[in-house]
Image (cartoon, helix red, strand yellow):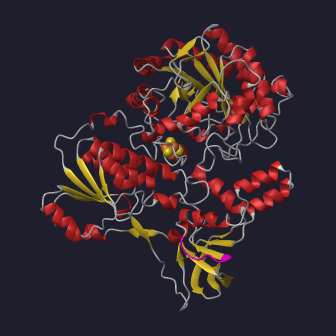
Amino acid sequence: MSILFSPAQIGSLQLRNRLVMTPIHLGYSPKGEVNDQLIEFYRARARGGVGLIIVGGCGIDRIGNAFGMTQLDDDRFIPGLRRLVDAVHEEGAKIVPQLYQAGRYAHSALTGQPSVAPSPIASRLTGQTPEELTEGKIVEIIASFVSAAKRSQAAGFDGVEILASAGYLISQFLSPVTNQRTDRYGGDLEARMTFGLEVVEAVREAVGPDYPIIVRVAGNDFVPGSHTNTESRAFCQALEKAGVNAINVTGGWHETPVPQLTMNVPPGAYTYLASGIKQVVSIPVIACNRINTPDLAEEILQEGKADFIGMARPLLADPELPNKAMNGHSELIRQCIGCNQGCLDYVFRLKPTSCLVNAEAGREAELASSGPTKESQRILVIGAGPAGMEFARVATARGHQVTIWEENEQSGGQLKLAASPPGRQDFLNLGTYLANACLELGVTIEYNVKATPENVLTSVQEGKFTRVVIATGARPISPPIPIEAGVETLQAWDVLLGCGKIGKNVIVVGGGAVGVDTALLLAECGTLDNDTLRFLMLQHAETDKELYRLLTQGSKKITVLEMDKGIGRDIGPSTRWSMLADLKRYKVNCQDQTKVLEVRADGVLVENEGAQKIIPADTVILAVGSRSNNELYLALQGKIDSLSIIGDAAKPRKVLDAIHEAYAEAIRV
Ligand code: SF4
């Protein structure tokens, strides 16, 4: 019997199941208003079976908001908010807004005014120093929380969530790092909790005793000198006394040096934060952060570690996740892979949220009309990489008959490369999903079939196919660098796939994403494996310092050389910092602005700031980019009327762009 999909309650709020869509910044409301894009986005998630949706964040004022945020700071927004609430209710889910005030995380370039905070401590996120709040201004902000809650009630929302996590205003008051006040809002933990509790108490008084209030907390700030899970538990106990109905537990702040949401965070790794809080409160606790499958969610509930499961990105990736799980089709769930490329990276770039694996995310309203095709075609796709399979999946769903010819014995294309480095295995889940979805829909995938201009043309002439889509991917390039006779280099793609003999002293030429991935993969060689680490820790066999050394010092010396400024510039901002930190931990020697002049038997001749030197190496790996594998397309051009090219075969690009382009082509044909 599933606990996840059994009805449950938060205060007076009855929910059809225990799956909560936790807040995610969408950036869909450029003027703060609710619009069709936002409504259809959430309608799709409600239709998909989630129990509760928390919309967020929603700005309670203008001084503490972010770009494209839905606003709760004016009565004129109430009619639009009511439309959103009605849409979600029509689909059987409940909905609450998250009351958001960013404090020192607000950026003056967006708000048009300096940010405010308990104390004027510069923010690493914005690079700005906020103004210290006066007591009068604090009273005003509490009043804004209250007004926003009352507007939520007026719009028909089923409750509210107050944001007190991730380094936003309330957590800034809680933390000794950002709260250095000497008035009643600063000092010991009790004093630092004052602001958050006053917000909760004022909202409770305004909305009445039965209106559900959830508070989102950081189970641990993961910021040096700030709160750990001990202080967080104390705050949650105080929240319960103040009349809060549920606690939503997330991880650290945006400034934390500890990865929270990247692919290398093991699924469910932070559940202990929620379970720690659950031990000290009697109200429901929501666990979240990298809980990306219904099976894991169920396990957490079965073990009594939480009462509800929060998922945001998994529902961005697949709004139908709950229905698929309830109907016994978990293998068809399009899992969030933790790449952050379409969600967090877009937000950091002030772009509306999208999703690498789900090209429809945020476009539900616009794509509502792209239904079944009027004229079914017989389509041949060459290549079962991500672009080819995504095209096949969507085109087949629209009523076309699709066959894929794949020259290898497996599908997935370059996803295998992307999944090779440590902590990147989730990329394989995308390939598995696409293959499963194609199979379910009836796409024919023929493996070990080498497409040639002749056999493709013959198939078209014989009427087997009416359209051909080339998705043949890319191949790595070799730079025009002189290589001493007899010296062999390796391609990073081969190394990522486990081919090639690697020595002890390795140089990776090219410091983009592929070079960084390759360096990390090799740097891990010879370090402690999980089982040994666990054994040594359980036996207290080594000191923490020694374990750390064994974990981070492998058997190879790795150097990454990059011609331009900066390493890993093509990696998204939400992931790059943690990969650069890993390179540092593994003591990978990264040299940018370094030109490789020649590969020699004894190493690589480089030039940096006008000076030349030899860097010794026994293995040189090339990671300098790729080029389109488009020969087949060029050979067929002009010979087949309905011929197109997608993905890396058209132009090397990120997986997100390949998937989205394939999707666009599939709804066009
Ligand atoms: Fe998950 Fe990546 Fe999609 Fe974000 S873009 S929701 S991390 S799959």
Compared with 534, 487 (above or below) is below
- Residue at the farthest front position: 1
Give the residues in magenta: 499-505
Considering only vertical position in the picture, is 390 above or below 194?
A: below
Residue 80 position in % (x across, y down): 43, 21
Can residue 136 be seen here? The reply is: no
Query: Is residue 211 magenta-colored?
Result: no
- Residue 642 horizontal/vertical position (percent): 19, 57
Q: Nearer the viewer, residue 394 or 135?
A: 394
* Residue 477 relative to residue 508: left or right: left
Q: Main secondary structure of the magenta part?
A: loop
Of 659 and 68, the residue lying toward us? 659
Q: Position of residue 372 (x, y in %)?
A: 23, 38
Is 306 rendered above or below residue 454?
above
Q: Residue furthest left?
A: 462
Q: Nearer the viewer, residue 653 or 2?
A: 2
- Residue 8: percent from left, percent from top: 57, 17
